[in-house]
Image: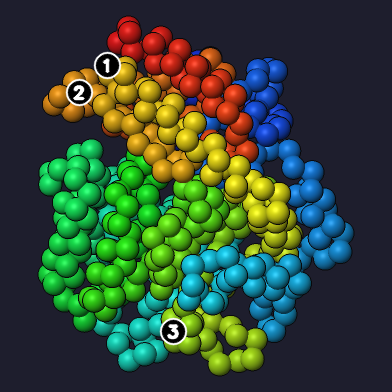
Amino acid sequence: MLALDRAHLVHPVANWRGHEQRGATVLQSGRGAWLRDAEGRELLDAFAGLWCVNIGYGHDSVVEAAARQMRKLPYATGYFGFSSEPAIELAAKLVEIAPAGLDHVYLTLGGSEAVDAAVRLIVQYYNSTGRPRKKQFISIERGYHGSSSTGAGLTALPAFHRGFDLPRPEQHYIASPYPYRNPAGRDAKAVIASSVAALRAKVNELGAENVAAYFCEPIQGSGGVIVPPVGWLKAMREACRELDILFVADEVITGFGRTGPMFACDAEGVSPDLMTVAKGLTSGYAPMGALLMSERVYAGIADGTPSGAVVGHGATYSAHPVSAAVALEVIRLYEEGGILANGQRVARHFESGLQAMLRHPLVGDARSRGLLGALELVSDKVTKERFDPALDLPDRLAAAGYRNGLIFRAFGDGILGFAPALCYTPSEFEAMFERLQRTLDEVLDQP
Ligand code: PMP
């Protein structure tokens, strides 16, 4: 399998060169928070796959929902006036659970496609409302918004630009709130004020009449789990309203209970103009994402037909009925199955475990909200100096974690990311932190 994998399977961009330097780890099965690899190793997954398997592995009711729909009707196009029952039910369900004011849903195959759709439909919206000059987009340094050309341009991580002409001329960035390293200091008020001022300055520089939208993750994920202070999201949303630009919340990671409530926007009573989701929507059991939008935006892009189509956008697998059936069952498990409530209940074990890691001389910052968190390693806690990248510390830690039966994400800049499934038990957190402690001790005591 490893030889065939190396010979033929192209893997996505990764900073991780494989455990034991021998290639990929072939995963074979999973149950709850646990995975088993092809060699029979039991692994505790502290990253929910790729921050997506929020309900955990092995839910038979999801498998049955998919099989039922495949038997009944495996495919239905959303084009030409056709629709399907699961897609309709899912759109209605998403509107019911989403922040107020998001009344229309465009279903995609994943997060990147949802972000792409957002950009295209926002441009259409301004065209149709007589302001075609509003075409500039603003996002945040260290933000991640997908792997399409458009999403990679909104992404402000150099690894995703290298070799391409990105960002495009219409894509602009402002500084990340990054409390641990914000020049304005860690104080919540100062962090929020610095972000609002940066957004105002960027909009003024570009001219409000040219700026279409501001994209942000409520908590930046792939940029290193940057947790802004409570109040930041609301302040940014209000600033967008004042500046007359659309506010797009990219909840691809933060949605579906990852930070506590169903959506991170809920915690601050924020209603975005548009919201992108994916990952936890189906918990990884089938590919699907969604773009939710307000009545105002939808009215600008509807083509006027009774089926409610949008102008000039769509794909073969938009609103796939099998993925929709899976999403409906996954959402039922969050709500009626008690998984969302369990995630909220056990989050304190996650937070206290991360905070305890601060005792380690090389852990400079521990941050989390709900079940999304990170440790930031530094070579000096006072100066916050980062480790020499040549030491390859994050990769070595991830490989040692694997040997200790623990999966987490190693980012550059010495940041370790964690996103345990919402089904974790207190004793699984004990196992997670015991394995993590052992891993840090092994690697950090012998740099
Ligand atoms: N937005 C955010 C915030 C993401 O984290 C991701 C994926 N990591 C995406 C968009 C892209 O989603 P996908 O990988 O499903 O295309």
Q: Is residue 148 visible?
A: no
Residue linked to disc 2: 381
Q: Earlier in the sequence, mark 2 or mark 1?
A: 1
**Where's the N terminus, which quadrant?**
top right
Q: Earlier in the sequence, mark 2 or mark 3?
A: 3
Rate crowding at label 1 as few (under 14), some (14 to 19) or many (20 or more) other CA atoms within 10 Å. some
Classify mark 1: helix, strand or loop.
loop
- The residue lying toward the viewer, choosing from 228 and 267, is 267
Res 385 quadrant in image:
top left
Q: Does residue 435 appear to the left or right of 359 in the view shown?
A: right
**Residues at marks 2 and 1 touching, judged by CB atoms closer than 8 Å:** yes
2 vs 3, front mark: 2
Q: Which mark is residue 148?
A: none
3 vs 1, front mark: 1
Q: Which mark is residue 361?
A: 1
What distance separates the C-alpha of mark 3 from that of mark 1?
A: 52 Å
- The residue lying toward the viewer, choosing from 91 and 205, is 91
Rate crowding at label 2 as few (under 14), some (14 to 19) or many (20 or more) other CA atoms within 10 Å. some
Residue linked to disc 3: 296
What distance separates the C-alpha of mark 2 from that of mark 1?
A: 7 Å
- The residue lying toward the viewer, choosing from 35 and 375, is 375
Classify mark 3: helix, strand or loop.
helix
The three-letter code of the residue at mark 3 reads Arg
At 20% from the left and 23% from the top, the residue drawn is 381
